[in-house]
Amino acid sequence: MTSGNAWQALRRPGLLRSAWPWRSAGYLLLSGLAGLLAGIGLLVCVTVAGVLAVVLVGLPLLAALALAGVPFAALERRLLRLVDEAPVADPHRAPDRPGLAVWLRLRYRERATWRELGYTALAAFVLWPVDLVAVGFVVVVPGQLLASPALLALDGEQVNVLKVWQVHSPAVTVALALAGAVLLAALAYPLTALAAGRAALARLLVEPTGSELRIGELVSSRARLVDAFEAERRRIERDLHDGAQQRLVALSMSLGLARLDAPAGGPLAGRLADAHREAGEVLRELRELINGIHPQVLADRGLPDACADLADRSAVPAEVAFDLPGRLPAAVESACWFAVSEALANTAKHSGARRARVTGRHAGGRLAVEVWDDGAGGADPAAGSGLTGLADRVAVVDGTLTVSSPPGGPTLIRLEIPCTPLTP
C-alpha cells in the first residue's frame, strides 16, 4: 500500500491500480450491513422494552440500550482500518477496580458513551441505506454490463441489460462490456471519496477528543509518577540502611572498644563516652528517619504488620484488626501506611484520647481503612491538623478520605482506595 488513507490515495496517481477502491467498497458494504443489523436490533429492543416497561421489566433493557453504542463503535474502529491505516484510540477509560457495577457506572458517566450512542443511531437509521445503495450501484450496473456477453452466450437469444434493454447482438454486448469497464473505473473515484468522507465522520464520533486524550494521559502519567516516587523512596531507604546506618554502627562499636582501652576516670574516657552516646543517638534518629521514608516491615510483611508496628510505637494504646485477601500494590500500601501513621500522630498530639483502633478490610475492589479514637474530637482540616496533607497523599492513588470528628468526639478517619490484591 502506498497511501495511509483513502484521501491520500485520491490525490495520488494510480488509484485504479491500487487496492483502495476495493477496500472502500468493502468498508461501505460492511458498515452498511452493520448499520442495518443495528437498526433492526435497536427497533426490536425498543419495542420489547416499551411493551415490558408497563410491568417495569423493560426499564433495565431501556437503560442497557444506552450502552449499545459501545460495541458498535468498537466494531467501527476496526472497520476504519480498511480505509485509514492510522489506528483509532479507544476513548473509554479502564475501570480502576473490577466488577460490573463499577464498569457500568464509569461508562454511563463518560461523554464518549453518549457520543457513540448517537453515532450508532445515525448509522442504524440514516447512513446504512447510503452505504449499501452506493456499493450496489457501483457493483450492479457495471457488473451487469461486463457480464452481458456471457449472459447472451448462456441464453443464446437475448439478454436483458439492467431489466430495461433487450440485446440480441453479440457485438452490442461486447460494446456494453467495454462501457461497463470504463464506468467501473470512473465510479472508483466517487466511491473512494464517499468511503473517505464516511470514515471521517465515523472517526469524528468514535475517536477520543482532545480533552479525553489529556485526561487519559494525566491518569497514566500520575500512575507512572506514583511508581517512580515509590521506587525512589525505596532506593533512598536502601542506601541509608546499607550505607550510612552500617557506618554508624561500625563507628559506635569502635567507640565502645576505645572506651574499654581508655584509662578509667580520665578525661579521654569521658570524651569517648560522650562520643559513644552521641553516636547512639544519631543511629537511633537515622533508624527513625529510615522507617519514616519506607518502613522495612511494610515491604517485607505487608500493611497489617506495618500498622501493628505503628500501634506498638504509638503514644496512645491502639488496637489493630485487618482482614485482607493478600498483599496489595506497593503504592497503595505505602499511601495507606503513611495515612495511618499521620492519623495516629494527630491522635497523640491533638485529641487527648485514651485509646485508638485501626481496622481495615478489602471488599468490592476497594481497601477501606478506619482510624478511630475516643478523644475530644473537633478535628478541622483547615486548622493545620495535617488532614489536608493526608487527603492529598491518599488522592495520589485515587483514594478518598472522610473525617467525622464532632466536638466531644469520637473521631473517625476513613480512607478508601480502589485496588486489586496482588497475591492471595
Image (cartoon, rainbow, N blue to C red):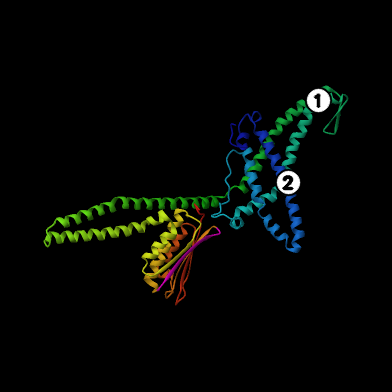
Of the image marks 2 and 1, the number of the one nearer the N terminus: 2
Provide the residue designation for mark 1. Answer: 150
Relative side of 333 to 268, left or right: right
Q: Mark 2 against mark 1, which lies toward the viewer?
A: 2
As drawn, 171 above or below 5: above
Q: Are marks 2 and 1 in contact (CB under 8 Å)?
A: no
Q: Quadrant of residue 87?
A: top right
Badge 1 crowding class, 10 Å Cα cut-off, few under 14, some 14 to 19, many 20 or more, is some
Relative side of 302 to 157, left or right: left
Q: Amino acid at mark 1?
A: Ala
Q: Within the magenta stretch, is there residue 359?
A: yes
Is the stretch drawn in magenta largely helix, strand or loop? strand
Q: Percent x, y for residue 141?
A: 77, 33
Residue 384 visible in this rendered orientation of the protein:
no
As drawn, 398 above or below 144: below
Residue 410 visible in this rendered orientation of the protein:
yes
| Outermost residue toward the right in this view | 157
Tell me the residue at 37%/70% (across/down): 349
What is the spatial separation of the Cα atoms under label 2 and label 1, in whole angstroms? 35 Å
Q: Quadrant of residue 135?
A: top right
In the drawing, what numbered circle is on residue 37? Answer: 2
- Given residues 375 and 354, the one toward you in this image is 354
User: What kind of element bears circle 1?
Assistant: helix
In the drawing, what numbered circle is on residue 404? Answer: none
- For the N terminus, the image quarter is top right
Q: Write down the region rendered in magenta.
A: 353-364
User: What kind of element bears circle 2?
Assistant: helix
Q: Percent x, y for residue 86?
A: 57, 40
